[in-house]
Image: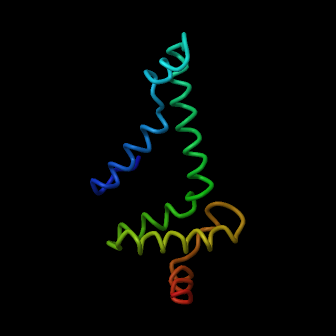
Amino acid sequence: MFIPATFGIALLMTILSTCCWGSFANTFKVTKNYRFELYYWDYGAGIFLISLILAFTMGSTNGGLAVALAEGAGLLQAARFGCAVAALSVTRPGTAPSMPFREEVDALLLKNK
């Protein structure tokens, strides 16, 4: 579960969830006799698709991003740290074994300053 720290992030998550959720009322107006059960399929498909997209695009950055935010870094610095973690992680096989050590991440950040 993700608890937003700022109002801006909470608003962004609300809008994103609403986009994934779909709108039964609007769908019902466009298509005649649209069954109510399909509304839940719309919501489920939207959540699944956004989860899939985020898993393949930002999945590796979340751990590093969370660490940097917990250490008090700003959002931009935390995103940079998360991307460095992801860059090192995707060069190795496996899930847990692919996670880089802190020294490796710091060295990569210093090298690409």
In the displayed structure image, the side of residue 69 where residue 22 appears, left or right? right
Q: Relative to 91, is 50 above or below?
A: above
Q: Relative to 36, is 66 above or below?
A: below
The answer to which of 84 and 13 lies nearer the viewer is 13
Q: Quadrant of residue 23?
A: top left
The answer to which of 29 and 95 lies nearer the viewer is 29
Q: Relative to 108, is 79 above or below?
A: above
Q: Quadrant of residue 60?
A: bottom right
Q: Residue at x 58, y 33 (%)?
A: 45
The single residue placed furthest to the front in the displayed view is 30
Q: Residue at x 37, y 67 (%)?
A: 69
The answer to which of 6 and 98 lies nearer the viewer is 6
The answer to which of 48 and 100 lies nearer the viewer is 48
Locate residue 57, reporting x and y percent.
Answer: 59, 58
Task: Report the colour scheme.
Answer: rainbow
Locate residue 102, reporting x and y percent.
Answer: 51, 78
The single residue placed furthest to the left in the displayed view is 7
Report the number of numbered marks: 0
